[in-house]
Image (cartoon, grey):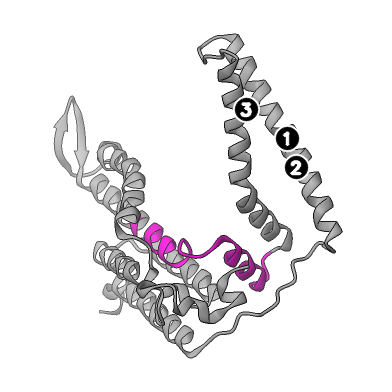
């Protein structure tokens, strides 16, 4: 169970980036709701100025999240690798005012604008999600989703997947090592396809056997299909203040988006 549930004071001693007023100390339920609200608002934007401001808001959250900036931007760069193809191809796919011609294909300003919109939207939403939700422990996220009245079966599936995905990866690596020890070398032939089919089948069998053992162990410990929380989440003044600031930022983005309608 997360430190916020078991020992709320422990988060004050983790380090300088996890002190009072930082995102990891805030109510997880509120963080999930604000992340969803911000994502919906940003997706509805089309004005480039509003989208740039949305990216600025997301970047402002990074120092407060406790996430290492270098590693976070590396993950963002991996996503932007796909966005680059959009920036290159979309101008040639959308009709409009030509910028230049390449091999007989016209690149339009309208297509470039749409590509930039997609890039700004994706970066703002993903970075905000990483700061608000990505800095959350998986168990804490599961408890927060349960507190938000999400379907209990889906929440349990999320928590079990988070808990055992690394175990299944280790099982896969052991099976792959056993195949290599027996001289298996992958190639483009039926033997390779059949061997990987056996590997997937064995993974499913091992996963089923492990799930039955885990279920038996949990029933022996009194599991009745529900996770019982020892302590409930509570909203504090700091949580309400952060929620008010994020909501105000979202409203401001909408005002910038529709400023011409109010003029």
Q: Residue, x 44% and y 67% (percent of image)?
A: 132
Q: x, y percentage for residue 117?
A: 30, 54
Marks 1 and 3, the one that precedes in the sequence: 3
Which residue carries the number 1 mark? 206
Vertical side of 190 occupied by 241: above or below: below
- The rendered magenta stretch, by its main secondary structure, is classed as helix
Which residue carries the number 3 mark? 175
| 228 to the left or right of 38 | right
Q: CA distance from mark 1 to mark 3?
A: 11 Å
Q: x, y percentage for residue 21?
A: 40, 81
Can residue 44 be seen here? The reply is no
Q: Quadrant of residue 6?
A: bottom right
Figure quadrant of the N terminus? bottom right
Which residue carries the number 2 mark? 210
Q: Residue, x 32% and y 69% (percent of image)?
A: 63
Can residue 35 be seen here? The reply is yes
Q: Quadrant of residue 50?
A: bottom left
Q: Residues within 10 Å of mark 2 (few under 14, many from 20)?
A: some
User: In the rendered structure, which segment of residues is drawn in magenta?
Assistant: 123-150
Q: x, y percentage for residue 172?
A: 60, 33
| 42 to the left or right of 240 | left
Q: CA distance from mark 1 to mark 2?
A: 6 Å
Q: Residues within 10 Å of mark 1 (few under 14, many from 20)?
A: some
Vertical side of 208 occupied by 43: above or below: below
User: Mark 1 near mark 2, Cβ–Cβ under 8 Å?
Assistant: yes
Q: Residue, x 29% and y 40% (percent of image)?
A: 90
Q: Quadrant of residue 15?
A: bottom left
């Amino acid at each position: 169970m997360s430190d916020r549930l078991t020992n709320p004071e422990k988060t004050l001693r983790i380090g300088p980036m996890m002190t009072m007023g930082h995102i990891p100390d805030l109510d997880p339920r509120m963080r999930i709701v604000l992340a969803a609200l911000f994502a919906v608002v940003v997706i509805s934007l089309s004005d480039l100025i509003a989208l740039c401001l949305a990216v600025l808001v997301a970047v402002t959250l990074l120092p407060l999240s406790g996430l290492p900036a270098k590693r976070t931007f590396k993950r963002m760069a991996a996503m932007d690798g796909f966005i680059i193809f959009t920036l290159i191809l979309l101008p040639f796919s959308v009709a409009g005012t030509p910028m230049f011609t390449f091999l007989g294909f016209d690149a339009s300003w309208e297509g470039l604008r749409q590509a930039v919109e997609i890039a700004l939207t994706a970066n703002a939403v993903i970075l905000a999600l990483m700061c608000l939700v990505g800095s959350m422990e998986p168990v804490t996220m599961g408890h927060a989703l349960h507190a938000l009245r999400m379907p209990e079966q889906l929440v349990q599936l999320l928590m079990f997947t988070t808990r055992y995905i690394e175990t299944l990866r280790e099982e896969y690596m052991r099976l792959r090592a056993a195949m290599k020890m027996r001289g298996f070398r992958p190639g483009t032939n039926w033997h390779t396809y059949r061997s990987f089919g056996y590997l997937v089948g064995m993974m499913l069998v091992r996963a089923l056997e492990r799930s039955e053992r885990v279920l038996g162990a949990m029933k022996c410990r009194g599991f009745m299909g529900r996770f019982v929380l020892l302590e409930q989440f509570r909203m504090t003044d700091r949580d309400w203040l952060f929620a008010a600031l994020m909501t105000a930022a979202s409203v401001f983005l909408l005002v910038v988006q529709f400023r011409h309608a109010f003029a």
